[in-house]
Amino acid sequence: MVTLTPLEAELLAVAGSVPDPELPVLTLQELGVLRAVHVRDTDSVEVELTPTYTGCPAVEAMSTDIERALRDHGVREVTVRTVLSPAWSTDDISAEGRRKLREFGIAPPRAQRTAGPVGIALGPTRTAGQDPEPVRCPHCGSADTELLSRFSSTACKALRRCLDCREPFDHFKEL
C-alpha cells in the first residue's frame, strides 16, 4: 500500500470529488477511476486516471474537470495521465457509489466473483431464479427483470425492465 503525504491526500480528495461527466450522481473517486495523485514539486501535480473502458469518450472531460478543480485549489501545473493497467473493473465502484446509482434509478453492477474474462450469456435474458445474483430493479427491488438492450445511454450500461413494476431502468454492466 502506498502511503500518501498529507498534501497528496488533500489533492486526491479534491480530484476525487469531481463528478463523472456521464453519471454526475457519482464522483470520480466513487466510480473508482481516479488511481493516484503525485506531487512532483511545489506547483506541479500528476494525476493517474483509468477509464472505465479503453475507448471511453468521457476521459477528456474527466481530465479537464480534474485540471480545473486542482487549479482552483491552487495547483499551477496539472498533468492527467491515462493509465490502462491495472484495468478498471466495476468492482472498483465504492459501496457509496453503488448506493448512489441505485438511488438514482440505475441498477449497480453485481460483484465479480472471479478474476479473468467476463462471461457472455447467450441464453434467456430473464434473471429471476437463473443467476446466483440477479439484476435487481432499482425502483422496487424485484429480481424478476429482463434485458431489453445490451446497450443503453452509454456503452457501459444495458437497458432492462422490471417484470413486477414494469419500469425500465439502466443496469451498469459488470466489467
Image: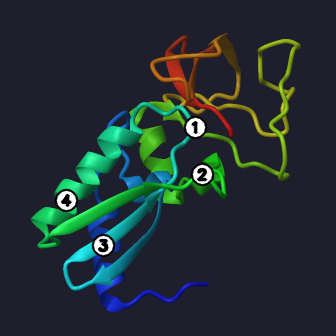
Residue 174: x and y, percent? 68, 38
Residue that badge 2 annotates: 84
Mark-to-mark CA distance, 4 and 1: 24 Å
Mark-to-mark CA distance, 3 and 4: 12 Å
Residue visible at 87% across and 26% down in the picture: 130
| Left or right placement of residue 74 versus residue 105 in this view | left
Q: Residues within 10 Å of mark 4 (few under 14, many from 20)?
A: some
Mark-to-mark CA distance, 2 and 3: 19 Å
Residue that badge 1 annotates: 54
Query: Image quadrant for the C terminus?
Result: top right
Q: Are marks 2 and 4 in contact (CB under 8 Å)?
A: no
Front residue (pair 129, 169): 169
| Left or right placement of residue 147 versus residue 53 in this view | right
User: Residue 69 got which mark?
Assistant: 4
Mark-to-mark CA distance, 2 and 1: 7 Å
Q: Earlier in the sequence, mark 2 or mark 3?
A: 3
Mark-to-mark CA distance, 2 and 4: 23 Å
Q: Are marks 2 and 1 in contact (CB under 8 Å)?
A: yes
Residue that badge 3 annotates: 45
Residue visible at 44% across and 86% down in the picture: 4
